[in-house]
Image (spheres, helix red, strand yellow):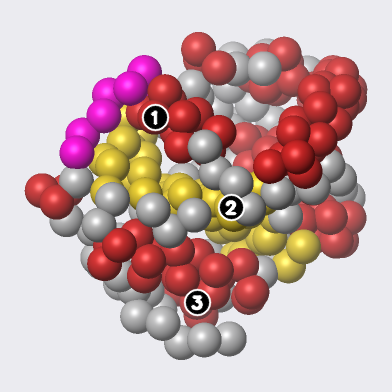
């Protein structure tokens, strides 16, 4: 694995976009890519995003794990159509998911979701927060939530402590975008395919225990890696 330094992100060099503006900019940039791809780094272990919560995610929030997994099956046609569109544009959306143990209910659910997405052409790799590629570079705090778009733009996505989306800083300077895209690619190379990871580690776990608010129960017990 390449031993890259951790790039920096100075908010003063970016443009702040509130959440609606970020989502609009994200859609426009991804839709405009031909013969290229995007790279996403996910580090936060719990998200809310109530305006974009799927039926499966809502079932998880309500504590119905079996319904949550069952409802994931209802989106296969949408995933197939998205894959066909990506094929038409020769576009690939790569994802790297950093995981902590014990798993939060959200990440346990998301890994099942990502495995399904990987069946429809989305390359997803999983890497532990204990991996050297992560741990050695988090001496000043957790890695940021980053999405890069074919080397031309970068969104540094920001969330509240409760996991609610706030918006993103947009960067278009190649001197900022390029090193971050290279770093995410390095993590991708070091990670494990989400399909084998879920089968080996996540699928055998018991259903997550949640409070009525959808957060992990304080006394939840999870098997460690």
Which residue is at 50% across, 77% downward?
A: 133
For the question of whether residue 99 can be seen, the reply is: no
Marks 1 and 2: CB-CB under 8 Å?
no
Please give the residue where the numbered disc 1 appears in the rendered image. Answer: 25
Q: Which mark is residue 193?
A: none
Marks 3 and 2: CB-CB under 8 Å?
no
**Percent from the top left, x then y, of residue 200?**
87, 61
User: Which of these two is toward me, 88 or 5?
Assistant: 88
- How far apart are labels 3 and 2 at the CA level? 23 Å
* Res. 100 image quadrant: bottom right
Residue reaching furthest left?
12
Q: Which mark is residue 133?
A: 3
Secondary structure under the numbered disc 2 in the rendered image: strand
Q: Which mark is residue 37?
A: 2
- Crowd rating for badge 1 (residues with CA inside 10 Å; few <14, some 14–19, many 20+): some
The disc, 3 or 2, on the residue closer to the chain's N-terminal end is 2
Secondary structure under the numbered disc 3 in the rendered image: helix
């Amino acid at each position: 694995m390449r031993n890259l330094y951790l790039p920096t992100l100075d908010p003063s060099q970016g443009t702040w976009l509130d959440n609606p503006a970020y989502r609009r900019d994200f859609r426009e940039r991804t839709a405009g890519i031909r013969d290229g791809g995007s790279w996403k780094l996910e580090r936060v272990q719990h998200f809310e995003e109530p305006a974009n919560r799927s039926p499966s995610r809502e079932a998880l929030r309500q504590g119905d794990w079996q319904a949550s997994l069952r409802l994931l099956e209802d989106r296969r046609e949408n995933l197939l159509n998205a894959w066909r569109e990506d094929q038409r544009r020769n576009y690939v959306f790569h994802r790297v998911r950093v995981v902590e143990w014990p798993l939060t209910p959200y990440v346990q659910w998301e890994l099942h979701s990502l495995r399904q997405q990987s069946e429809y052409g989305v390359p997803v790799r999983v890497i532990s927060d204990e991996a050297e590629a992560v741990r050695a570079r988090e001496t000043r705090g957790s890695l940021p939530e980053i999405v890069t778009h074919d080397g031309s733009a970068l969104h540094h996505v920001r969330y509240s402590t409760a996991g609610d989306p706030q918006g993103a800083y947009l960067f278009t300077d190649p001197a900022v975008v390029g090193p971050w895209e290279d770093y995410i690619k390095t993590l991708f190379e070091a990670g494990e395919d989400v399909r084998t990871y879920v089968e080996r580690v996540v699928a055998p776990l018991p259903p997550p225990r949640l409070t009525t608010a959808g957060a992990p129960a304080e006394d939840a017990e999870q098997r460690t890696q």
